[in-house]
Image (cartoon, helix red, strand yellow):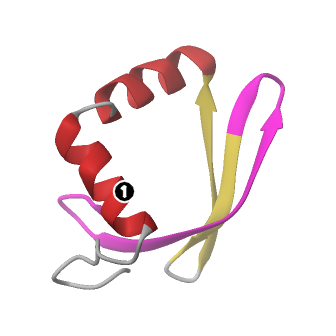
């Protein structure tokens, strides 16, 4: 996945996911730096709610069966 900020673009790879203290913790690397993302229950509900749109569901299903590659390729 690619994270873009005004200052930098980071290729992020999630390598592990777990539940810790009622939070979803995603661990991996951003370029060469180790990183974690912690998502609370309410944040997860908002995020998943935003993802439940027809276009995103179609992209997910295409990707699941190998047809959802981006033009740039995966970061």
Q: Is residue 15 visible?
A: yes
Residue closer to the observer: 64 or 29: 64
Q: Is residue 44 left or right of residue 67?
A: right
Q: How many marks?
A: 1
Point 37% across, 23% down: residue: 49
Residue 41: give x, y in percent of width and height: 61, 18
The answer to whether 66 is drawn above or below residue 62 in the figure is below
Q: Residue at x 78, y 22 (%)?
A: 22
Residue furthest out toward the top? 42
Whether residue 2 is visible, yes or no, is no
Depth check: give the residue in front, 24 or 32: 24
Q: Nearer the viewer, residue 39 or 54?
A: 54
Q: Position of residue 10 (x, y in %)?
A: 38, 72
Does the magenta run of residues contain 11?
yes
On whether residue 12 falls in the magenta region, the answer is yes
Residue name at image x 31 percent, y 64 percent: 62
Instruction: Describe residue 38's horizontal placement relative to residue 43 as left or right.
Output: right
Predominant secondary structure, magenta span: strand
SS at mark 1 in the image? helix
Look at the image and give the residue range highlighted in magenta. Answer: 1-24
How far from the left and from the top, in percent, is residue 25? 70, 43
The image quarter in which residue 75 lies: bottom left
Q: Nearer the viewer, residue 25 or 61?
A: 61
Q: Position of residue 6 (x, y in %)?
A: 17, 59
Q: Residue at x 69, y 58 (%)?
A: 27
Vertical arrangement, residue 29 with respect to residue 57, above or below: below
Q: Mark 1 highlights which residue?
A: 61
Vertical side of 19 occupied by 70: above or below: below
Q: Quadrant of the N terminus?
A: bottom left
**Looking at the image, which residue sits at the far front?**
65
Q: Residues within 10 Å of mark 1 (few under 14, many from 20)?
A: few
């Amino acid at each position: 996945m690619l994270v873009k900020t005004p200052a930098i673009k980071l290729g992020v790879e999630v390598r592990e996911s777990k539940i810790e203290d009622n939070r979803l913790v995603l661990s991996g690397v951003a370029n060469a730096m180790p990183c974690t993302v912690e998502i609370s229950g309410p944040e997860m509900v908002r995020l998943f709610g935003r993802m439940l749109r027809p276009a995103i569901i179609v992209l997910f299903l295409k990707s699941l069966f190998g047809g959802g590659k981006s033009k740039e390729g995966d970061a």
